[in-house]
Amino acid sequence: MPSAPLDPDMLRRLQEDVIDSYDEELEMEVDDRILDGPGDQTAEAREARRVYFRELFRLQGELVKLQDWVVHTGQRIVVLFEGRDAAGKGGAIKRITQRLNPRVCRVAALPAPNDREKTQWYFQRYVAHLPAAGEMVLFDRSWYNRAGVERVMGFCSDDEYEEFFRSVPEFEKMLVRSGIRVIKYWFSISDEEQSARFLARIHDPLKQWKLSPMDLESRRRWEDYTRAKEVMLERTHIAEAPWWVVQAVDKKRARLNLIHHLLQQFDYHEVEHEPVHLPPRERRPDYLRNPVPASMYVPEIY
């Protein structure tokens, strides 16, 4: 049975709700204002931004289809996001998860291990975040911390470092054999681009929280991180869970390319859903809504 046509006022309210959801994405883009600068007002830049949003919304629609397929088929998916500080991992993850159900697609961003976790099997704290059937887990940094920051900053011994490289291929093969799909992305940026992004954070009060002493130290040790990254890619690029490198100097292009590539990794299809009908609200003659004291309302400043 087709739904009754919407009256003009309700149609307007629904349109405003859609625009409001798009504004969330626009707010994220405005947050990059310092890097874009006033030169972003050229006709070419405006057209590029229009294309970017058009493609982003289209790809996010496909991510919703992928999500439905993951739930319907009971898939278990792990996606690792690795890269230097300020490489754009967090921004890409935000665009992936923005329209998705957090119960289906969740983010694991683990802090530094505590004293107890330091005594556990290295992979133990990551195992706790692996997906069940019908789930996708996006690791914003992962067990590859040992091959990167821990190696460069001296937080692990040479023996622990070598044991990691002996163990991680077998660990990932074990995950794949158990039915978990493992996809690994490395975000690649240039020396100059990282410097610009760090400066943007330094001069933007809304972004200064993103800078830690460890981030600043990583900037000084750029070449050490480069060597560590090269060893990591060489020793952990396996057929069961290969590395994919994202050219991330242009953040917008990187997001689109990554989402497109991620979608291409699955032979998903649109899942049929039963039509949804909003039931009429029951109205009882004895129902009386109690007034809320004025002191409990949030002041309407805006």
Image (spheres, rainbow, N blue to C red):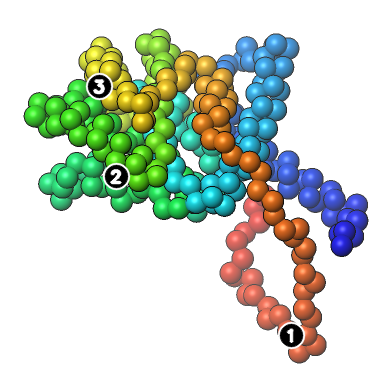
Estimate the spatial distance between the alpha carbons at disc 3 and disc 2, rounded to whole Å: 20 Å
| Label 3 packing within 10 angstroms: few (<14), some (14-19), many (20+) | few
Rendered location of residue 291, percent (x, y): 68, 78
At label 2, the amino acid type is Tyr
Rendered location of residue 206, percent (x, y): 47, 33
Q: Which residue is mark 3?
A: 235
Q: In the image, which is nearer the foreground, mark 3 or mark 2? A: 3
**Could you say which quadrant of the image residue 5 lies in?**
bottom right
Q: In the image, which is nearer the foreground, mark 1 or mark 2? A: 2
Pick whichever, 178 or 128, lies toward us: 178
At label 3, the amino acid type is Arg
Instruction: Please give left or right for residue 40 compared with residue 129 in the image.
Output: right
Estimate the spatial distance between the alpha carbons at disc 1 and disc 2, rounded to whole Å: 51 Å
Q: Which residue is mark 2?
A: 126
Of the residues under marks 1 and 2, which one precedes in the sequence?
A: 2
Identify the image quadrant of the N terminus. bottom right
| Label 2 packing within 10 angstroms: few (<14), some (14-19), many (20+) | some
| Label 1 packing within 10 angstroms: few (<14), some (14-19), many (20+) | few
Local SS, label 3: helix
Of the residues under marks 1 and 3, which one precedes in the sequence?
A: 3
Residue visible at 34% across and 41% down in the picture:
177
The reply to whether callout 1 and callout 3 are in contact (CB within 8 Å) is no
Residue visible at 48% across and 47% down in the picture:
75
Pick out the residue farthest to the bottom: 286
Instruction: Please give left or right for residue 67 compared with residue 170 in the image.
Output: right
Q: Which residue is mark 1?
A: 287
The reply to whether callout 3 and callout 2 are in contact (CB within 8 Å) is no
Residue visible at 66% across and 27% down in the picture:
55
Disc ID at residue 162: none
